[in-house]
Amino acid sequence: MDIRHRMAKRAAAYFSAGDIVNLGIGVPSLCNNYAAPGVMFHTENGLIGVGPLAEGLMRVESFCNANGMRFVPVPGSAVFDSADSFGIVRSGRLAATVLGGLQVSKGGDLANWARPGKMVGMGGAMDLVNGARKVIVTMELTAKGQPKILNECAYPLTGKACVDHIVTEQCVIDVTGDGLVLREILEGLTPDDIRRQIEPELLVAEDLTTLAA
Amino acid sequence: MSGKFRPKDEIVALFKDGQTIVHGGFANHGAPNALIDCVLESGARHLTLLGNDTGDPNETIGRLIHEGRVDKVIGSHIGMNAETVELVANGKIELTLIPQGSLAERIRCGGSGLGGVLTKTGLGTIAENGKQKIEVNGETWLLEPALRGDVAIVRARSADPYGNLTYRGTSRNFNPLVAKAAAITVVEADHLVELDELEPDRIVTPGVFVDMILAR
């Protein structure tokens, strides 16, 4: 399994049957391949019940996800307008949202929608990180050798103190009241290997789990 | 079967320079393409677009960007449209970005006789810049004021002569919200139906919000 799918599979392990979940683009969008039966997916343009991508004759003109990809709705799907869609988000009805990240701070601030001088829009991300009960960020630990987990984010924020779990290609880190805690680590790596690639202090969980490479 | 159905030339005549056009559609999906044709045909310029996004380059609502008709964009995301991104970067288009859920609520308020809405979305980010914060029950909220347009352009599935509307699938998105939020609301529908063909319980937008429907 390649790294992207491994990260998606790990993030999807946070979902349980009955959960309603919103997935961002990129690695997060792969999570639906690994979710437990009974998890339903929300798309912010107005539906709960996103199913597999539609191909050939399955392409139904009127069901698109937020990336404009056509899909087949699952039995029990419901459509609604954009106001109800974000009412669902803000009122805590989503068990989780999975998003990509540019930077995460030690306090769980997330920057994922803009780089300085390049602001094309936050879309629904600010609402999602404000409202979802669990915010899971999937991202690589570093970008071009530079750490992405920082004391403070330099890029414009998506939300303050909103991130719960960071799933990377090398480890899983939780944001807690005590600081960042290393929960899981790839076989063959040590906590110090992770510490070298992030800026803040990193605590190690007593029950640190090793992930098979 | 006349009611609010109007010929194209009557609808083209609604669009004038400097108007704010509030539009349905999300990433091209559920966009009112025939009404966008009417805006293009009207020759109207210096428009403000109020809606989720500006579509793909020269597609759906993006055709108004491509043809140079737009001075301002208010939306949540323009990343799909490289032409909009470039015009914003060159200072040719003024861009206001609003978190998508707050945008939906601001348009809903604009159509519902409300002054605005309180949300926590955007607190501690640049989305709060220039906005009022309000304490209610010991919690801090961001005030997102109502937004309205001069003309709303809406894509529906079915429309009857009174302007009662249904939608289909995710092409609903912002359409029922924008249908309420303008001085004049114009609709295009896949199906124009007779009175009483739409069961009252199925109607999403009551005709009271609709002024004109593009006739075939």
Image (spheres, rainbow, N blue to C red):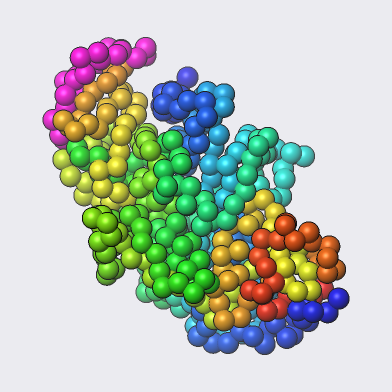
Q: Nearer the viewer, residue B143 or B214?
A: B143
Residue A187: quarter of image = top left
Above or below, A212 relative to B48? above
Q: Is residue A13 visible?
A: yes
**Does residue B194 appear to the left or right of B173 in the view shown?**
right
**Does residue B114 appear to the left or right of A67 in the view shown?**
left
Above or below, B198 relative to A148? below
- Rendering coords of residue A102 (x, y %): 31, 43
Above or below, B33 relative to B1? above
- Rendering coords of residue A163 (x, y %): 30, 38
Q: Is residue A62 magenta?
A: no
- Rendering coords of residue B166 (x, y %): 71, 60
Work out which quarter of the rendered image holds the C terminus of chain B and state it.
bottom right
Magenta segment: A187-213
Q: Number of marks in the image? A: 0
Q: Is residue A190 magenta?
A: yes
